[in-house]
Image (tube, rainbow, N blue to C red):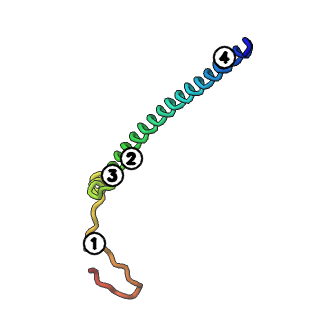
Amino acid sequence: MSKMSKRGVVYLALLTTLLVSLLYVRSRFFLVELSYKISRALESKSSLEQEKRELSLELSTLKNPDRIERIATQKFGLKRIQTSASIVMTPKGKKHAAP
């Protein structure tokens, strides 16, 4: 082989090695970047699940019938209706005894 053709083969080998190295480094960089994104997404998921548990607990606390009755009586002055205090409506002309 001539000197020029040997040089051409060496340059081609160096260029190929450089391109393969650059592709490898880029793929590793991309892999690390994806790993960080996955890590952040998992942290966000964990945080949102914790927030969901807290909100579910708050909802069940707010829907508690004893709490609602206490607020109704203390804050708004409402009273639980007694069954003897109910009024029965009948058509006009008919009499109906209260229970």
User: Closer to the observer: label 1 or label 2?
Assistant: 2
Callout 2 secondary element: helix
Q: Which residue is mark 2?
A: 52
Distance from the alpha carbon under mark 4 to that under mark 3: 77 Å
**First in residue order: circle 1 vs circle 3:** 3
For this view, does 70 lie left or right of residue 46?
left
Distance from the alpha carbon under mark 3 to that under mark 2: 15 Å
Q: Which residue is mark 4?
A: 10
Q: Which residue is mark 3?
A: 62
Q: Which mark is residue 85?
A: 1
Q: Residue at x 56, y 27 (%)?
A: 24
Q: Quadrant of residue 12?
A: top right
User: Which amino acid type corresponds to the residue marked 2 in the rendered image?
Assistant: Lys
User: Which amino acid type corresponds to the residue marked 4 in the rendered image?
Assistant: Val
Q: Residue at x 30, y 51 (%)?
A: 61
Q: Residue furthest front?
A: 1
Name the spot of residue 84 as percent of width and height, x first: 25, 74
Q: Which mark is residue 51?
A: none
Distance from the alpha carbon under mark 1 to that under mark 2: 43 Å
Decide: is 51 above or below 37: below
Q: Quadrant of residue 13?
A: top right
User: Closer to the observer: label 4 or label 3?
Assistant: 4
**First in residue order: circle 3 vs circle 2:** 2
Q: Quadrant of the N terminus?
A: top right
Callout 3 secondary element: helix
